[in-house]
Amino acid sequence: MKGKVADQSLAPEGKKKIDWVNKNMPVMKEVVDLLEAEKPFNGYRVGISVHLEAKTARLAQAIRDGGAEVFVTSSNPLSTQDDVAAALNEEDGITVYSRRGVDEDEYVWQLGKVLEGKPEIIIDDGGDLVKQLHGPRSDLAENVIGGAEETTTGVNRLRALDRKGELTFPMFAVNDAKMKYLFDNRYGTGQSSWDALMRTTNLTVAGSVAVVVGYGWCGKGIAMRADGLGANVIVVEVDPIKALEAKMDGYRVMSIEEAAPEGDFFVTATSNIKVIPRRALEKVKDGAILSNAGHFDVEIDLEALNDIAVDRDVVRENIERYELGDGRDVYVIGEGRLVNLAAGDGHPAEIMDISFALQALTAKYIADNEGLEDKLYSVPEKVDLEVAEMKLSSLGVELDELTGDQKDYLNDLR
């Protein structure tokens, strides 16, 4: 058997999931038609590290259909759906190394197996392929002509490398594209985080106090959806401009220590460490539910929570109870990993339709433009606009166009 997945016999169920999302990703259908016609990846190997579920399977298929040999793994130990991994591993031209619930050693081994395929193009989500290629697997970096990064955490890592002049191949910050952060980060994270929380806990959001830590585009979406579900929303921020924006959007704004005793649900979205720190954990109310929508499991200080807990157990799938010394119970969802995938199905298909069109077309841009400088790039505006136009077309939306007089007026303002 090629690759390594948890159970190859699960493939038929995974195929059903992939077929379902394919019917709801019209932009990717148009992208696949383009890639199949032009075959921009002929002769290329592409390494992909993503949250391995049905929508990302569609991305891998699209890259393969564009002519590439594709190697795929997960970008998080709890975000793989084993049936989807098995289905994808059966496909010609695609090799999968991924299973749900691996430990750190196996997770790194999976990344290594993808890189041992010697990809010339990489598609990363969180920056772990890039981290390996700038660390223990730097011997394989010379093969890479460029890559695309999906999420905020990964782009932050890339910016750090770029500032130091240490990037050894060109990378594109797909997360910074308007068609990514305005839709995936805001509407996708907002809906999928609460989908996962509601399904996992089976509790009512209406009337609760929801504490959203971080008010970037993901935090805005989480707060907006919590408000729409009837929650009383508190925002925690360190940036004065974002804090003021949250205040004027109608939310209460306070420090994490002030918010701790009030919150029923906590959702972090900062890409930073320990944003729910020990001093807040010592004050949370009995029954508080802690979750994280950021890429890595570092936003809740789980080390501190383990230290102050006197007992812990799993009370329901993806819910772990921590009993504190004074009898309070605190619940952590999905081990503090990104809640929408560790405890749910991730973003809706129609949202990932946009994001993966961006990834696929950015990868095509890399293949069409070999010889780029070793630095961090923005997604070309024409790619951003092309995806927007495809999406509007799929929705049956037509736009007005500027008249000649209007264009002349805008070009001749004095």
Image (tube, grey):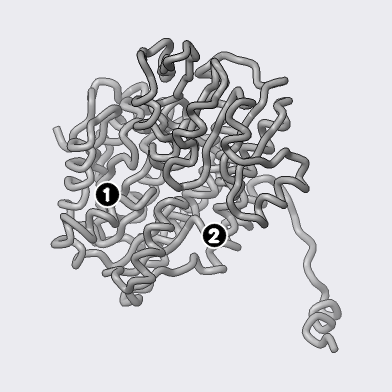
Which residue sits at x=19%, y=67%? 142
Considering the image in quadrants, where does the C terminus appear? bottom right
User: As drawn, is 115 to the left or to the right of 218?
Assistant: left
SS for dot 2: loop
271 vs 199: above or below? below
Residue 158: x and y, percent? 38, 61
Which residue sits at x=50%, y=18%? 200
Q: Report whether residue 20 is seen.
A: no
Instruction: Say which amino acid is labelled 1.
Output: Val
Residue that lies at the very extreme toward the front in this rendered image: 326
365 vs 218: above or below? below
Looking at marks 2 and 1 on the same chain, the residue that comes earlier in the sequence is marked by 1
- State the residue in front, 32 or 333: 333
- State the residue in front, 41 or 46: 46
Residue 366: x and y, percent? 37, 67
Which residue sits at x=36%, y=26%? 14
Residue 336: x and y, percent? 42, 31
User: As drawn, is 356 to the left or to the right of 182?
Assistant: left
Instruction: Say which amino acid is labelled 2.
Output: Ala
Judging by the rendered image, the residue that carries numbered circle 1 is 70
> Between marks 2 and 1, how big is the CA–CA gap?
24 Å
Find residue 177 and name its label: 2
| Callout 1 crowding tier (Cα within 10 Å): few <14, some 14–19, many ≥20 | many
User: As drawn, is 278 to the left or to the right of 372?
Assistant: right
Which residue sits at x=47%, y=49%? 356
278 vs 27: above or below? above
- State the residue in front, 185 or 292: 292
15 vs 324: above or below? below
